[in-house]
Image (cartoon, grey):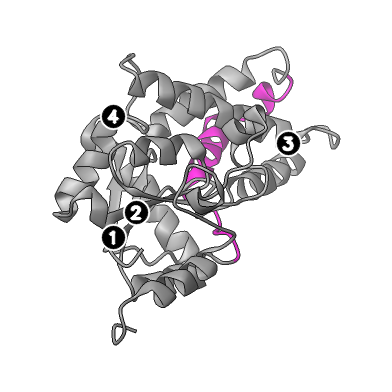
Amino acid sequence: MDNVKALIFDVFGTVVDWRSSVVAELEVLGKQHGVASDTDWNKFAQQWRSGYIKNTRRIAAGASGPLNVDAMHREILEDLLSSSEWSHIGPLWDEKTRQHLNLVWHRLNGWPDAVEGLHALKKQAIIATLSNGNVRLLIDMAKHAGLPWDMVFSTELFNTFKPSPKAYLEAMRHLSLPPENCAMVAAHIYDLRAAGSLGMTTIYVRRPHEDGDAIQLDLDVKSKEDGGEVDCVVDSFTELAEILARAAPAGEN
């Protein structure tokens, strides 16, 4: 991978642990507002996330809908709170509480290896996001979690969502780099399949319980060297930094 000059990162689930971050805030709000202690906040968080995935993929395929994820998250939150399963919570959370909760996606914490790994990778290549999250969300998240991006690309800037080819092509265009000099780093196989179809190097990061498509298909994601479909599989950003350091031409590290 000595040809890689830019590492382009998916963010939700790849860089940050959205699940534990969202569940922790839900638990706090639940206690503050008298929600039953046995409420399954993991399920609530997963349904919120699943609604986001469903809607972004639908819009990426050409359907109409909000292109700002803050607006999308709020619509999904309102739908959840008015559903029969969660309607007992709705009356307990006023508008101020809902506004605060909706911005939890701006306050997600990085995986344990994220900050150290990104700083190491930043010494070897451009590091940029390519996320369906909106611009302000990604900026706030970077400040909250200490993520040292060189550039923040949001699909909001391109009026689409991943996995639309336009998202990847526009990010590479703005970096003035061809696909062979760019790698997509993600914990989701659908993201890497889209990037790989455009000629980008594909790096899969294993994250616990994160890749819904791979789980649903019972797919063990492997590198091409091991008979799989991606170029590289790692368990952390620090491992990726070590691999890139070994691949770099002599004298560059």
Q: CA distance from mark 1 to mark 2?
A: 6 Å
Q: What's the CA distance linking mark 2 and mark 4?
A: 20 Å
Type of the residue with mark 2:
Ala
Kindly tell me whether residue 40 is visible in this rendering: yes
Quadrant housing the C terminus = bottom left
Distance between the alpha carbons at the discs numbered 4 and 3: 30 Å
Lower sequence index among marks 1 and 2: 1
Between 220 and 238, the one lying in front of the other is: 220
- The answer to whether the residues at label 2 and label 3 have Cβ atoms under 8 Å apart is no
The reply to whether residue 107 is in sight is no
Q: Position of residue 75 (x, y in %)?
A: 47, 22
The number of discs equals 4
Q: Which residue corresponds to the image point at 73% horizontal and 36% vertical from the top-left? A: 41
Q: Which residue is mark 4?
A: 160
Q: Nearer the viewer, residue 235 or 97?
A: 235
The residue under label 1 is 6
Residue marked by disc 2: 183
Asked if 141 appears above or below 31 in the picture, the reply is below
For label 4, the crowd category at 10 Å Cα-Cα, with few meaning under 14, some 14 to 19 and many 20 or more, is: many
Q: Do the residues bearing badges 4 and 3 touch, measured as CB atoms within 8 Å? A: no
- Discs 1, 2 touching: Cβ within 8 Å: yes
Q: Nearer the viewer, mark 4 or mark 3?
A: 4
SS majority, magenta: helix
Q: Amino acid at mark 3?
A: Trp
- Where residue 149 sits in the image (x, y, percent)? 34, 63
